[in-house]
Image (cartoon, rainbow, N blue to C red):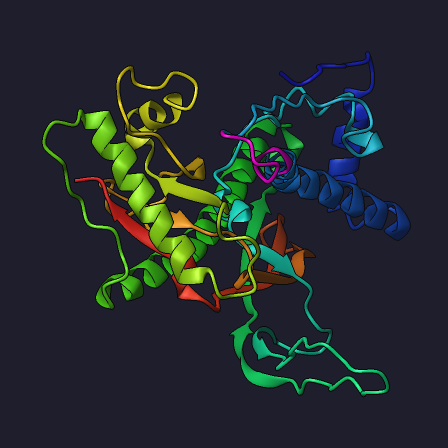
Amino acid sequence: MADLLIEEGEEKKFWLALQAFKDPRKDAELRIKARKDMNKLLDHFVGRPERLAKKKLQAFKGNKQKLQAFNGGTVKGDLPELFTDNVSIYVDSDAEIDLFYNAIFDQVPTTPGLDYFEIANIHSGIVWKRLVEGERVEIGGITGDAMQVKLNRFGAALGVNDDTIRYRKIWRIVDAAKEFRFAYYQLMGDNHGALLHGAAALGRSNGYYQAFSTVAGLSETENYIRLFNLGCAKVAEKLKTRPYGNMSNPSLVVLASPKKKSVISKVMNTLIQPIQGSKQALDWSINPLYTWNGKAIPDENKVKIILPGRKIQMGIESEMEEYAVTDPLTLNYALARYSWRGAGIGDTDQILELDLA
């Protein structure tokens, strides 16, 4: 839970600042400062899931079998100074958001002035050979092409009316901020999820997937172990000649519906407690990642085995740029946020769909 550090008299400071940003009779400099303070508060609230996700991602990329739990509380200094002691009580800042795509897409730098980034498909033509004394080393020419990924603009506005401020209806601000934040990350999840599913569907149309099958005499869990071994081996073999690292034991992500936790957990548990008398064992390093996102997992009976990063990339030129205005005719304060970002998959073979039924 968040630390609730309410000091007597400090709560009033928040409301004075909130009123100042919209009151034309206030000093312009004071209104600008108040507006910046409010923007910082919203930025902190909207961005908190990303910060929590990064801490989880460190554990995830450390080849852990499961995402480590993280329960971060709000502490003094975690919020802008003006609001530290009087706003944390109103904001359930420990709420987590489904950011599954952050564990799969590598973030790459964008180029200022360009509305796209590129996922390169480069072959350097380098050949290593033994050189006799005095022989010149050859320079390999760079050939290949690149896929352009456009940076799209995403935007939304959060409105606060005069009554909310005048009568201190803080719950309205909090509820609006929650909805504002959730809608943004839901859209990002949908966009990245659609890319992953599209890549898997393309592979399936070309025969690159793992169909469900069973072997008589094996238990249900043993059959699932066999199925995951077949799927992982298929991904590793497909990518073995590409510059993605050691494919004899890659760290793979299994993206699945939470409804399949029981199935996957039973498979994972055999790493600790092997099935007595069974010859079936999980031979590959897989990291379960669960999401309810229907764009990423439209069919709960199909999971995706993914080699994360590499040619699965996202670019963020600008995140949550702010624009604010007060409408004198309605006394509404509008706070708009825009993000410029894009994502693409340069090698669809990094995603393979596996049928669980």
| Res 289 visible | yes
The stretch in magenta equals 58-65
Relative to 289, 357 lies left or right: left
Identify whether 346 is placed above or below 178.
Answer: below
Identify whether 130 is placed above or below 55.
Answer: below
Q: Nearer the viewer, residue 308 or 296?
A: 308
Taking the spot 16% from the left edge, 40% from the top edge, the residue there is 357
Taking the spot 51% from the left edge, 66% from the top edge, the residue there is 242
Residue 322, horizontal then vertical, whole percent: 69, 56
Please identify the quadrant where the N terminus is shown: top right
Q: Nearer the viewer, residue 322 or 140?
A: 140
Q: How many marks?
A: 0
Quarter of image, res 342: bottom right
**Residue at far left of view:** 216
| Res 296 visible | no
Quarter of image, res 191: bottom left
Relative to 23, 325 lies left or right: left
Secondary structure of the magenta portion, mostly? Answer: loop
Instruction: Check if residue 64 falls in the magenta segment.
Output: yes
